[in-house]
Amino acid sequence: MGKRLLRNPGVVGGAAIFLLLLAAALAAGAVATHDPTRLDPVNRLKPPSARHYFGTDEFGRDVWSLVVYGARVSLLVGGVTMILTSVGGIAIGLAAGYYRRLDALIMRFTDGLMAFPAVLLAIAFMAARGPGVWNVILALSIVYMPRTALLVRSTVLTLRELDYVQAARALGSRDAGITLRHILPNCMAPLLVQGTFIFAYAVLAEAILGFLGVGVPPYVPSWGNVIASGKNVIREAFWVSLFPGVALTVAGLSLNLLGDGLRDTLDPRLRVQG
Amino acid sequence: MAAYLIRRVLAVIPVMLVVVTLVFLLIHLIPGDPAAAILGPDATPAQIEATRIQLGLDRPLHEQLLKFYSRLLQGDLGRSYFLDRPVTQALWERAEPTALLTIAALLVAIVIGVPSGLVAGAYPGSVWDRVLMFGALLGVCVPGFWLSLNFIYFFAVQLRWLPAGGYASIFVDPWAAVRYMVLPAVSLGFNQSALIARIARSCMLEVLQQDYIRTARAKGLSQGVVIVGHAFRNAMVPVVTVIGITTAILIGGAVVTEIVFNIPGLGRLIISAILRRDYPVVQGVVLVTAATYVVVNLIVDVVYVFIDPRIRYG
């Protein structure tokens, strides 16, 4: 398994880029050249130079440092959303897949939740709860949880009919034991694949919420916030919105490469032929 | 088939019940007292109390919910505090730009996505396949709203070919409408074209492995005839379903695109409503988009039955 993963160029390339971003985010203090919140009106809207790699924004803040610190917010939101949707999805999916009475109720609820365009549901949630990192994480977890729940449920429905699960039941195992020992481990590979894509969606959605002014508060350096402030000065300073957008694209690319690669390696049934 | 269609239409009811309930609950997600939050910090306790009663927040939750349902069935979404008119009227005034933007973006997505996917799938492993699929991967990853900004910088600020933002109704000035719509529609549709291309490619690959394709080849038909005459139509069937999903994503994306290009649609309406704490409008926009999604998917499922006669839902 490990060897096969290492032979997949998507997994290796995606993971390498992602780890680079993660390292930059964790060591932001060392990687950034300026304090990202320091205003310097004299040096506002300066183009990229040796002193300011990515130029400065309308308040004279260093865009390179904003992008580096913005990676923290993006990866925090993406990572925690991935964990919350997985944990919640496992709980709901197992319950729905194993208890038929609960299933109909849960399915109607997830159908209803999935009828909202994802971004709009997150916007509506943020409208009620107000700006903040944890509200963004909560909003995106609610938006994406039905997807993980449906995935776990469908895996459970397939597995529970298989001979080895029937055998475990014939041997007298209880529902809880069968679920945890025999079914849950088999949900892990598809969940990991989907989690990678949810990570990517969450990073993008966080930037969209920030761009619209309903995400993390405007004074927090995040890619969406910086792109939003770059929008106002695009005529005279294109670099303010350009570089955080490149960072966002690179993050999305790394996670998509990783997700596609993991899917091809871990779950050959889902592979797109060719 | 009639039985399937009836069941499919009836299935809309529970979904809409959940949607309406969630939209209703939105106002109860507001931390603290919603009435105080709506009125802002300057309100007097008497004003807050009056608003509580006006919103029905003093009644038990189930009573509020039943009232919400019954008003909705009469087509009443409440009044906008700020715009001082019924929410339904505000929605109606802003629906045209969003609907046209979504349709235009959908056309862009289909026109770019379907041919690229089918060509890539017809010649897997070729240079075309590699170039197109790399483009599709980039297309999935490039954030649409950021692409919009780059388009504005390049085509509006630098080249001055197209306006940087704004809107004209196609029913009033069609030429101006098209000029305003090109950049928003392309930047919104591009992401989805990548998704459609990936799916069209895998459908084409699957169809080309079918027995009837082998038969067509065995009787001496050329590759072009096999692909255009036999594979193309069958590969299109699953692609139709994707268009339903695409529409939902496009409606959500239209909100963001409208902000970038200053288009007076539902997206601008909801964002300004949030800033003014005009919650009935927020609820209205969310409800209308979800309902649109449900209806579009219903239509897609019905169309699907007609274009693929193999489907006979038992």
Image (spheres, helix red, strand yellow):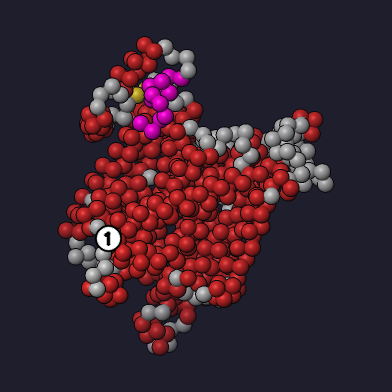
Horizontally, is A169 left or right of A193 in the view?
left
Residue under the point 21% across and 50% down: B10
Between B88 and B12, the residue placed more toward the observer is B12
Position of A76 relative to A174 (above/below): above
Between B302 and A147, the residue placed more toward the observer is A147
Could you tell me which secondary element the residue under label 1 belongs to?
Answer: helix
Image: magenta residue range: B28-40
Inspect the image, locate mark 1, and give the three-letter code of the amino acid beneath it: Tyr
Where residue A49 appears, as percent x and y from the top left, is 81, 45
Task: Sort mark 1 into few (<14), some (14-19) or many (20+) by Cα contacts within 10 Å.
Answer: some
Position of B121 relative to B101 (above/below): below
Residue under the point 32% across and 26% down: B78
Residue B32 in magenta stretch: yes
Where residue B125 appears, as percent x and y from the top left, is 56, 76
Residue under the point 17% across and 58% down: B2
Q: Report whether residue A60 is seen.
A: yes
